[in-house]
Image (tube, rainbow, N blue to C red):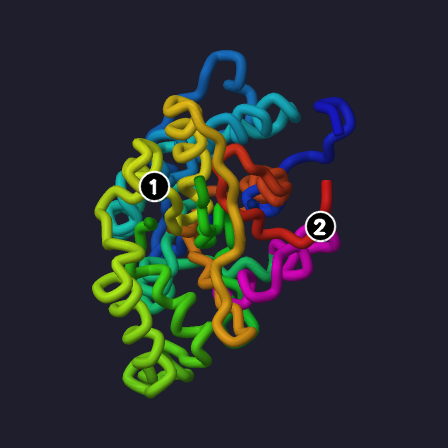
């Protein structure tokens, strides 16, 4: 669509656009009026509805996010989205909590798979079901992703910029988050419902294999900077998040070599891949927001799969 034939943009449309970290609508606890946090609108956009979105993406990921937002701002004439970097996921959550107390909140905020739960338990998120329609809804997203943000039939955040481990090939490096891949491949789980099962035999067997792979076979090692090690040619392969793909590609280009990616290894025919939610993101609305409906259009445009950052698309449709 062009700026001339786009529908009138609202908060619901913005929500649909962000479907590509988890996005949540913030909900202030208690009564009283809430206003929008301070932002800046360029002169050419001053007649538009102003939406403030807080996020936790720095470096290349921030550049990728800004590029998508610039594309959205230029695609229509009703809404201007301003992205404001707030630090890590934990720092963003703390700032959102402080903003709710001050009754000056952003329209949208990005949370991790951990921080969104804290906001939900504090009754600080706006349920999104009332913003869904034929264009935007649970059907838009991969089932496993959207279900993570659904509690008792109500959707509290939508997935966006999901991190997904991949094997990068050019021994190797390993990191703790990817151990979940091994646990699932060995037929185990971290937990079953609220029961912890990481101490069951399948998970222990996966752990013994990893220890032997590193200490006995000496085929891998734990690294604080696996992408840099790989980019400098210290290792021939590594396991990284798809969120690292853009930066790793730049490192490979600077090093003068090409890279390829592959699925995580299987064990006896079983495959496990732990997608992140915010390393991954979820987008939510604080409740009540200063502008309940004006953000949907931006989220709607972010529902398009995008590989600007290297993160895994969270939607089922093709564009």
Q: Residue at x 61, y 54 (%)?
A: 131
Residue 196 rendering spot, x and y as whole percentages: 31, 83
Q: Which residue is mark 2?
A: 317
Assign a secondary structure to mark 2.
loop
- Name the mark nearer the viewer: 1 or 2: 2
Magenta span contains residue 144: yes
Q: Nearer the viewer, residue 44 or 220?
A: 220
* Residue range highlighted in magenta: 131-149
| Residue that label 1 marks | 56
Residue at 32% x, 58% y is: 115
Instruction: Identify the residue at horizontal 68%, vertical 60% (top origin).
Output: 139
Res 59 → quadrant: top left
Q: Residue farthest to the right?
A: 5
Instruction: Kindly identify the residue that appears in the image at 44 percent across and 21 percent down.
Output: 41
Depth check, front residue: 284 or 191 = 191
Q: What SS does tag 1 mark?
A: loop
């Amino acid at each position: 669509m062009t700026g001339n034939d786009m529908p009138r943009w609202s908060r619901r449309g913005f929500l649909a656009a962000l479907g590509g970290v988890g996005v949540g609508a913030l909900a202030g606890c208690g009564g009283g009026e809430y206003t929008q946090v301070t932002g800046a609108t360029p002169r050419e956009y001053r007649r538009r509805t102003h939406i403030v979105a807080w996020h936790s993406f720095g470096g290349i990921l921030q550049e990728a996010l800004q590029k998508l937002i610039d594309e959205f701002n230029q695609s229509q004439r009703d809404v201007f989205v301003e992205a404001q970097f707030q630090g890590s996921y934990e720092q963003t959550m703390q700032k959102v909590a402080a903003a709710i107390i001050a009754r000056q909140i952003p329209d949208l905020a990005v949370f991790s798979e951990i921080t969104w739960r804290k906001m939900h338990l504090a009754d600080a998120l706006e349920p999104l079901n009332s913003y869904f329609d034929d264009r935007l809804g649970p059907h838009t997203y991969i089932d496993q992703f959207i279900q993570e943000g659904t509690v008792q039939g109500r959707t509290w955040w939508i997935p966006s910029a999901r991190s997904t481990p991949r094997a990068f090939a050019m021994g190797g490096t390993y990191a703790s988050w990817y151990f979940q891949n091994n646990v699932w491949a060995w037929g185990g789980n971290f937990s079953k419902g609220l029961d912890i099962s990481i101490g069951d035999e399948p998970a222990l067997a996966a752990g013994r294999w990893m220890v032997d792979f590193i200490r006995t076979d000496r085929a891998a090692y734990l690294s604080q900077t696996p992408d840099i090690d790989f980019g400098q040619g210290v290792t021939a392969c590594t396991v990284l998040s798809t969120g690292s793909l853009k930066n790793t590609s730049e490192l490979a280009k600077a090093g003068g070599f090409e890279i390829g990616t592959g699925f995580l290894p299987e064990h006896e025919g079983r495959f496990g891949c732990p997608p992140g939610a915010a390393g991954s993101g979820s987008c939510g609305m604080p409740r009540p927001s200063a502008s309940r409906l004006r953000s949907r259009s931006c989220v709607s445009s972010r529902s398009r799969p995008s590989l600007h950052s290297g993160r895994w698309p969270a939607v089922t449709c093709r564009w």
